[in-house]
Amino acid sequence: MDKQVSAEDIKIRAEKIKLLLMDCDGVLTDGKLYLTENGEEMKVFHVRDGQGLVMWHNAGFRSGVISGRNSKIVKKRAAELEVHFVKQGSKDKAICFEEILAEARVSMEEVAFVGDDVQDIVIFEKVGLPIAVADAVQEVFPYIIYKTKLAGGFGAVREVIDLLLRAKMIL
């Protein structure tokens, strides 16, 4: 991370977060594309990320996914976890972000975003708490202020939620 941000600054920013947005592939999943011989797609989600999202929602906060790919599996998993906003097949994540922001009626500083690749930079530049997973591409690190210890698909989202809830003194 190129930005020099103290743990106290991260805590102050985290206290303000009302909406957690995430990329899917490489954040909620390990970023690998699993295809069957019939061409069907499979994705693997970490159960702790799911439990974290349940905890986040139970604490009264909202979440969303902005993904460049379309997947019935993502739609199904998001519905199971009661994710509030799901935007898939996005060629321009900034547009999806603006749509969610307007619908959610929150300010940019009240949003945290977790991403892993260069197409996420347009959102990192806007949100109050830009976060990349540990195994994100190097190009994103100058744009974030927190890097998870865990890799995407291996509990990184739960790590972020624990950070947010601790800052709010809920966990």
Image: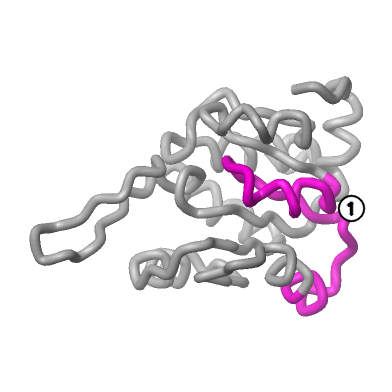
* Closest to the observer, 120 or 77: 120
Where is residue 39 shown, x and y percent of the image? Answer: 17, 64
Q: Quadrant of the C terminus?
A: top right
Q: Residue furthest bottom?
A: 103
Where is residue 139 shown, x and y percent of the image? Answer: 66, 32
Where is residue 90 shown, x and y percent of the image? Answer: 57, 69
Q: How is the image coloured?
A: one colour
Residue segment shown in magenta: 99-128
In the figure, is residue 38 to the left or right of 102? left
Residue at the spot x=31%, y=54% of the render?
43
14 inside magenta stretch: no
Label 1, secondary structure: give it. Answer: helix
Above or below residue 135? Residue 105 is: below
In the figure, is residue 12 to the left or right of 18? right
Residue at the spot x=80%, y=22% of the render?
2
Where is residue 138 shown, x and y percent of the image? Answer: 62, 27
Above or below residue 94? Residue 10 is: above
Binning the other alpha carbons within 10 Å of mark 1 as few (below 14), some (14 to 19) or many (20 upward) gives: some
Q: Quadrant of the N terminus?
A: top right
The residue singled out by tag 1 in the image is: 109
